[in-house]
Image (tube, rainbow, N blue to C red):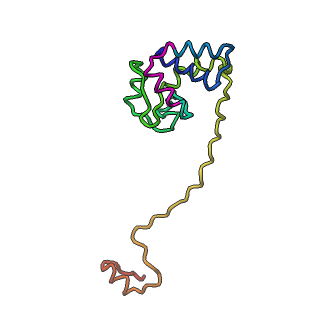
Amino acid sequence: MNELLQNLIKLQAIEFKEISEKNAGATAGELRGKIPPQILGHYDRLLAKGRKGVAAVRNQVCTGCHMRVPVAVVATLMHDTDIQLCENCGRYLYLAGDTDAKAEEGKSPAGTTRPKPVRKARKPKSSLQLVSTPGPVMPLAMGEDARTKMQPGLRSFSG
């Protein structure tokens, strides 16, 4: 991952107190010195509104605004050629799998999440047996005259 995005993620974690450090102010100042002023200005505008400036992309969805991110943006993030902004909320984007482990090093040990429980297979529904008839079903209340008018080739055989 891009070093610039790593610095932004770490700065955001410090400013929102997601990770605790002894010299948080000094570390934040050092990280701000490594980030270009245009990017830092945009990040600070988002912070002034009370919003986070960086959001992860999971399953092609921005975790900041929960809107779908275009495939081209995700491809650029995968190739790590440029930083990308969410078209909807304006946050800087990064792929979730790349830095979740790096950003949460101080938070909790890896592997503490429980696997999803396995669902039991459902019992099959009882299938209905359909009985097929060789022709159209005629109402029993109809007389023979009505049946022959509807289908001229149909005759009743007595025998």
Q: Main secondary structure of the magenta part?
A: helix
Query: Per the image, is 42 magenta?
Result: yes
Q: Which residues are magenta?
A: 33-46
Q: Nearer the viewer, residue 150 or 7?
A: 7
Quadrant in the rendering for residue 111: top right
Residue 138 percent location from the top left of the image? 42, 77
140 w.r.t. 95: above or below = below
Of the pair 29 and 125, the residue shown nearer to us: 29
Q: Nearer the viewer, residue 129 or 82?
A: 82
Give x and y (percent) for residue 11.
56, 20
Looking at the image, is 125 positioned above or below residue 140?
A: above
On the image, the x and y values in percent for residue 95 come to 49, 25
Observer able to see residue 93: yes
Left or right: residue 126 versus residue 2 is right
In this view, 116 is above or below 151? above
Say whether residue 1 is visible.
no
Q: Position of residue 142 (x, y in %)?
A: 43, 84
